[in-house]
Image: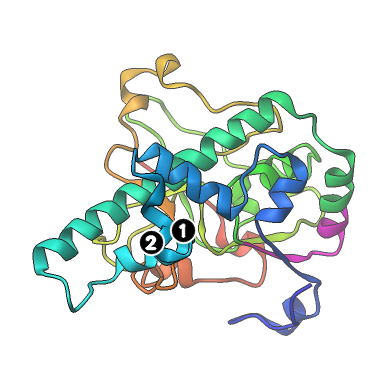
Amino acid sequence: MAKRYAPSMSVEELERPNVILGSGFSRSISEDMPTMAELGKQVIDRLALPETTLMTFNNNLEQWMSFLAVDQPWLSHADNLENRAWFARASAAVQECISDSEAKVIETTPLPDWLLRLVWTWCDQKANVFTFNYDTLLERALMELNRLDTFGDLYPMPLEWRVNAGDGGRFGSEGTRGEVLSLYKLHGSINWAFGGLDAPPSDRILLTGDFLRWSQPPLREEAMSPRERSMYDDVVPLIIPPTLTKGPYYTNLSLRASGDAPERHSTRAVS
């Protein structure tokens, strides 16, 4: 349990149970979800880098990515730019590895009863759940409870969703059925996207994956129409890598926002 403190929270929120989740929570759902050490190895393998890449950094993915993200004064300008390029590749690899692991979980693992009971209790208590995990296993479990119609009801921050030209409108959610927890994803999520680090602070965060129940896979690219495949080509996944330096990400105003209740920050549609 966390201390009863969180920035920009009302007195009512501070009286709710506060819960912090790390990679061990997702791992308890399925062994297919990686620990941080395993994620580091997966990222290095996906990038086809030598196995010794992380040895200089105590085999710690966080230390390595922190080194890549920040200009080092003893390196040339060209070398620092090369490091930033590897940082971007590593960030994308983190998102891909987590997405692949989640896909394997929902294909092979039944929804645990203990998880349903736990999230039901958190909803009844209107708990503030802070997670460092990128996956959407918790959101999928919550959808099975039929207490909400959209993941947007969980995130106490401004989010938008897109509708492609020619797809017509979409009926809005009727809201939650009963109380729900508030989910703060401190390192981003595999179903969020934004314009990247060079985007202005006012850049809105897009909700790219929604409504997914436990065993429901995302729509595969081969099953998409041409306009669906290109809908998010101008944005990148909002994965805040496990670095010691996160300042460039938290300049985004949406990430810095928090609210008193989920309904205050409804998900909006943009064309």
Against 78, residue 75 (above or below) is below
On the image, the x and y values in percent for residue 259 come to 60, 71
On the image, the x and y values in percent for residue 177 come to 79, 48
- For the N terminus, the image quarter is bottom right
On the image, the x and y values in percent for residue 63 come to 43, 67
Look at the image and say whether residue 48 sits in the magenta stretch.
no
Residue farthest top in this picture: 223
Q: Residues within 10 Å of mark 1 (few under 14, many from 20)?
A: many
Question: Residue at 89% across / 39% down in the picture?
Answer: 113
Residue 266 can be seen, yes or no: yes
Residue type indicated by callout 1: Leu
The residue that disc 1 covers is 61
Task: Give the label on residue 267, or none.
Answer: none
The residue that disc 2 covers is 65
Between 170 and 192, the residue placed more toward the observer is 192
Q: Give the magenta-colored segment's residue range.
A: 121-131
Look at the image and say whether residue 128 sits in the magenta stretch.
yes
Mark 2 touching mark 1, by CB under 8 A? yes
- Report which quarter residue 124 is drawn in: bottom right
Residue type indicated by callout 2: Met
Q: Is residue 40 left or right of residue 5?
A: left
